[in-house]
Amino acid sequence: MLAGVLLIVAIAVEVVATALLPRADGFTQPLWSGVVLVGYAVAIWLLTVVVRTMPVSVAYAIWSGVGTALVAVVGYLFLGEQLGWAKVLSLAMIVVGVIGLNLAGASH
């Protein structure tokens, strides 16, 4: 239970850090670069705490799949990125894959 909550927080922090990458402007903006790096450090630290009690394959599948989908949504909603049918279909396949890995991991 706690691992799941920490994983959600880790994903959220990582998504925020990723969404702020354009502000870091290739790491030429020190303040935003620092925020991005601290965000990634916190997210990775939380992930290391999560994998103490959750299989790393399941945790990383959730991390990468949900994180990728959320970054795409944030990019569309806040960063002016396009979200066409091919991207939506691809994101849906990622979500299905994450669900499948979770179901496979839950059976062990």
Image: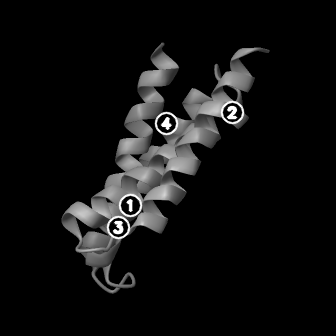
- Taking depth in this image into account, of 73 and 29 the one nearest to the observer is 73
Disc number lying in front (2 or 3): 3
Q: Which residue is mark 4?
A: 46
Residue at 43% x, 58% y is 88
- Label 4 sits on a secondary structure element that is helix
Q: Quadrant of the C terminus?
A: top right
Q: CA distance from mark 2 to mark 1?
A: 21 Å
Q: Would you say 19 lies left or right of 100 here?
A: left
- Label 3 sits on a secondary structure element that is loop
Q: Mark 3 or mark 4: which comes first in sequence?
A: 4
Q: Mark 2 or mark 1: which comes first in sequence?
A: 1
Q: Which x, y percent locates residue 51?
A: 64, 29
For the residue marked with disc 2, what is the amino acid?
Leu
Q: Which residue is mark 2?
A: 101
The answer to whether the residues at label 2 and label 4 have Cβ atoms under 8 Å apart is: no
For the residue marked with disc 4, what is the amino acid?
Leu
Q: Which x, y percent locates residue 18?
A: 38, 62
Disc number lying in front (2 or 4): 2
For the residue marked with disc 3, what is the amino acid?
Leu
The answer to whether the residues at label 4 and label 1 have Cβ atoms under 8 Å apart is: no
- Relative to 35, residue 29 above or below: below
Q: Which x, y percent locates residue 77?
A: 21, 61
Q: CA distance from mark 2 to mark 4?
A: 21 Å
Q: Which x, y percent locates residue 27?
A: 38, 81
Q: Would you say 19 lies left or right of 44 here?
A: left
The answer to whether the residues at label 2 and label 1 have Cβ atoms under 8 Å apart is: no
Q: Which residue is mark 1?
A: 72
Q: Mark 2 or mark 4: which comes first in sequence?
A: 4
